[in-house]
Image: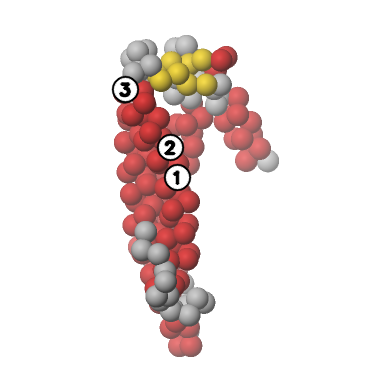
Protein backbone atom coordinates (compact mmCIF):
# COMPACT_ATOMS: atom_id res chain seq x y z
CA UNK A 1 0.00 0.00 0.00
CA UNK A 2 2.78 2.41 0.90
CA UNK A 3 4.40 1.89 -2.53
CA UNK A 4 1.20 2.98 -4.27
CA UNK A 5 1.13 6.13 -2.14
CA UNK A 6 4.74 6.89 -3.06
CA UNK A 7 4.03 6.26 -6.74
CA UNK A 8 1.02 8.58 -6.58
CA UNK A 9 3.08 11.30 -4.85
CA UNK A 10 5.86 10.93 -7.43
CA UNK A 11 3.40 11.08 -10.32
CA UNK A 12 1.73 14.15 -8.83
CA UNK A 13 5.09 15.93 -8.48
CA UNK A 14 6.75 14.76 -11.69
CA UNK A 15 6.14 17.88 -13.74
CA UNK A 16 8.09 21.08 -13.83
CA UNK A 17 6.77 24.57 -13.13
CA UNK A 18 7.76 28.05 -14.17
CA UNK A 19 9.47 28.52 -10.80
CA UNK A 20 11.29 25.19 -10.79
CA UNK A 21 12.20 23.00 -13.77
CA UNK A 22 13.69 20.26 -11.58
CA UNK A 23 10.73 18.12 -10.40
CA UNK A 24 10.44 17.06 -6.76
CA UNK A 25 9.96 13.49 -7.98
CA UNK A 26 13.62 13.53 -9.09
CA UNK A 27 14.68 14.33 -5.53
CA UNK A 28 12.51 11.51 -4.22
CA UNK A 29 13.86 8.92 -6.66
CA UNK A 30 17.44 10.05 -5.98
CA UNK A 31 16.82 9.63 -2.25
CA UNK A 32 15.57 6.07 -2.90
CA UNK A 33 18.67 5.34 -4.98
CA UNK A 34 20.96 6.70 -2.27
CA UNK A 35 19.09 4.68 0.39
CA UNK A 36 19.31 1.45 -1.60
CA UNK A 37 23.01 2.10 -2.24
CA UNK A 38 23.64 2.51 1.50
CA UNK A 39 21.79 -0.76 2.24
CA UNK A 40 23.77 -2.65 -0.43
CA UNK A 41 27.03 -1.14 0.86
CA UNK A 42 26.26 -2.22 4.43
CA UNK A 43 25.33 -5.74 3.28
CA UNK A 44 28.50 -5.90 1.17
CA UNK A 45 30.61 -5.00 4.21
CA UNK A 46 28.91 -7.86 6.11
CA UNK A 47 29.48 -10.33 3.23
CA UNK A 48 25.72 -10.24 2.60
CA UNK A 49 25.24 -12.33 5.74
CA UNK A 50 25.71 -15.45 3.60
CA UNK A 51 27.28 -18.73 4.59
CA UNK A 52 28.69 -20.91 1.81
CA UNK A 53 29.13 -24.68 1.94
CA UNK A 54 32.15 -26.53 0.58
CA UNK A 55 30.55 -27.48 -2.74
CA UNK A 56 29.59 -23.90 -3.62
CA UNK A 57 33.01 -22.45 -4.45
CA UNK A 58 32.12 -21.73 -8.09
CA UNK A 59 28.84 -20.04 -7.15
CA UNK A 60 30.54 -18.09 -4.37
CA UNK A 61 33.31 -16.91 -6.67
CA UNK A 62 30.83 -15.76 -9.32
CA UNK A 63 28.67 -14.04 -6.69
CA UNK A 64 31.65 -12.22 -5.17
CA UNK A 65 32.92 -11.07 -8.59
CA UNK A 66 29.45 -9.92 -9.65
CA UNK A 67 28.90 -8.03 -6.40
CA UNK A 68 32.32 -6.35 -6.63
CA UNK A 69 31.51 -5.18 -10.16
CA UNK A 70 27.97 -4.21 -9.16
CA UNK A 71 29.09 -2.14 -6.18
CA UNK A 72 31.85 -0.48 -8.20
CA UNK A 73 29.42 0.41 -11.00
CA UNK A 74 26.69 1.45 -8.55
CA UNK A 75 29.14 3.72 -6.70
CA UNK A 76 29.97 5.45 -9.98
CA UNK A 77 26.28 5.84 -10.86
CA UNK A 78 25.52 7.29 -7.41
CA UNK A 79 28.36 9.80 -7.82
CA UNK A 80 27.06 10.66 -11.31
CA UNK A 81 23.51 11.23 -10.06
CA UNK A 82 24.75 13.27 -7.11
CA UNK A 83 26.63 15.50 -9.55
CA UNK A 84 23.53 15.70 -11.76
CA UNK A 85 21.37 16.56 -8.73
CA UNK A 86 23.68 19.38 -7.65
CA UNK A 87 23.94 20.64 -11.24
CA UNK A 88 20.16 20.43 -11.75
CA UNK A 89 19.35 22.26 -8.55
CA UNK A 90 22.07 24.83 -9.33
CA UNK A 91 20.78 25.43 -12.84
CA UNK A 92 17.27 25.66 -11.44
CA UNK A 93 18.17 29.09 -10.07
CA UNK A 94 18.97 30.35 -13.57
CA UNK A 95 15.92 30.67 -15.80
CA UNK A 96 18.11 31.18 -18.85
CA UNK A 97 19.38 27.56 -18.80
CA UNK A 98 16.34 25.34 -18.69
CA UNK A 99 12.71 26.33 -18.66
CA UNK A 100 9.47 24.47 -18.27
CA UNK A 101 7.09 24.21 -21.20
CA UNK A 102 3.87 22.58 -22.36
CA UNK A 103 2.11 22.71 -19.01
CA UNK A 104 4.91 21.11 -17.00
CA UNK A 105 5.56 18.13 -19.27
CA UNK A 106 8.56 19.33 -21.31
CA UNK A 107 11.91 20.95 -20.69
CA UNK A 108 13.11 23.76 -22.91
CA UNK A 109 16.91 23.93 -23.14
CA UNK A 110 17.65 27.59 -23.64
CA UNK A 111 21.44 27.59 -23.41
CA UNK A 112 24.56 25.43 -23.60
CA UNK A 113 24.27 24.85 -19.84
CA UNK A 114 20.80 23.44 -20.35
CA UNK A 115 21.94 21.18 -23.18
CA UNK A 116 24.84 19.94 -21.03
CA UNK A 117 22.40 19.05 -18.26
CA UNK A 118 20.19 17.17 -20.75
CA UNK A 119 23.18 15.20 -22.04
CA UNK A 120 24.34 14.31 -18.51
CA UNK A 121 20.81 13.29 -17.55
CA UNK A 122 20.44 10.96 -20.54
CA UNK A 123 23.88 9.41 -20.06
CA UNK A 124 23.14 8.87 -16.36
CA UNK A 125 19.90 7.07 -17.06
CA UNK A 126 21.48 4.89 -19.75
CA UNK A 127 24.29 3.73 -17.46
CA UNK A 128 21.84 1.59 -15.50
CA UNK A 129 21.35 -0.71 -18.48
CA UNK A 130 25.08 -0.94 -18.98
CA UNK A 131 25.45 -1.91 -15.33
CA UNK A 132 23.04 -4.84 -15.67
CA UNK A 133 24.89 -6.14 -18.73
CA UNK A 134 28.32 -5.72 -17.14
CA UNK A 135 27.34 -7.46 -13.90
CA UNK A 136 25.14 -10.31 -15.08
CA UNK A 137 26.50 -11.14 -18.53
CA UNK A 138 30.11 -9.98 -18.82
CA UNK A 139 31.15 -11.07 -15.33
CA UNK A 140 29.53 -14.47 -15.80
CA UNK A 141 31.34 -14.90 -19.13
CA UNK A 142 34.68 -13.91 -17.60
CA UNK A 143 34.28 -16.26 -14.65
CA UNK A 144 33.19 -19.26 -16.69
CA UNK A 145 29.86 -19.74 -14.93
CA UNK A 146 26.82 -20.53 -17.00
CA UNK A 147 28.27 -19.22 -20.26
CA UNK A 148 31.23 -21.61 -20.37
CA UNK A 149 34.14 -19.23 -19.91
CA UNK A 150 35.63 -16.39 -21.85
CA UNK A 151 34.29 -16.19 -25.37
CA UNK A 152 36.93 -15.32 -27.96
CA UNK A 153 34.37 -13.38 -29.98
CA UNK A 154 33.07 -11.52 -26.92
CA UNK A 155 32.90 -7.78 -27.30
CA UNK A 156 35.22 -5.64 -25.23
CA UNK A 157 32.95 -2.63 -24.70
Would you call the spot at circle 3 few (<14 residues within 10 Å), some (14-19), or many (20 or more)? few
How far apart marks 2 and 3 lie (CA) works out to: 15 Å
Q: Earlier in the sequence, mark 1 or mark 3?
A: 3
Q: Which colour style is shown? A: secondary structure
Residue highlighted by disc 2:
122
Does the rendering let one see residue 1?
A: yes
Tally the numbered discs: 3
Q: Nearer the viewer, residue 25 or 127?
A: 127
Q: Quadrant of residue 154?
A: bottom left
How far apart marks 1 and 2 lie (CA) works out to: 6 Å
Q: Residue at position x 38%, y 16% from top?
A: 110
**Image-based side of 97 in relation to 20, left or right:** left
Q: Nearer the viewer, residue 46 or 95?
A: 95
Residue highlighted by disc 3:
112
**Residue that lies at the very extreme toward the front in this rendered image:** 153
Q: Earlier in the sequence, mark 2 or mark 3?
A: 3
Secondary structure beneath dot 1 equals helix
Q: Which mark is residue 126?
A: 1
Mark 1 vs mark 3: give the one in front: 3
Q: Residue at position x 60%, y 29% from top?
A: 11
**Residue that lies at the very extreme toward the bottom in this rendered image:** 54
The C terminus - image quarter = bottom left
Q: Quadrant of residue 12?
A: top right
Image marks 1 and 2: residues in contact by CB distance under 8 Å = yes
Secondary structure beneath dot 3 equals helix
Would you call the spot at circle 2 few (<14 residues within 10 Å), some (14-19), or many (20 or more)? few
When the figure is inspected, residue 92 is found, relative to residue 153, above or below; the finding is above
Secondary structure beneath dot 2 equals helix
Amino acid sequence: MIWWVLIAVAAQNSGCTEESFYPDAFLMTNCFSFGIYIMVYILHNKDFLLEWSEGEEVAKNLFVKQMERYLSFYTFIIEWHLFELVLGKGLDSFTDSIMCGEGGSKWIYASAKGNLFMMLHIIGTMMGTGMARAVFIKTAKEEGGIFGGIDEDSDDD
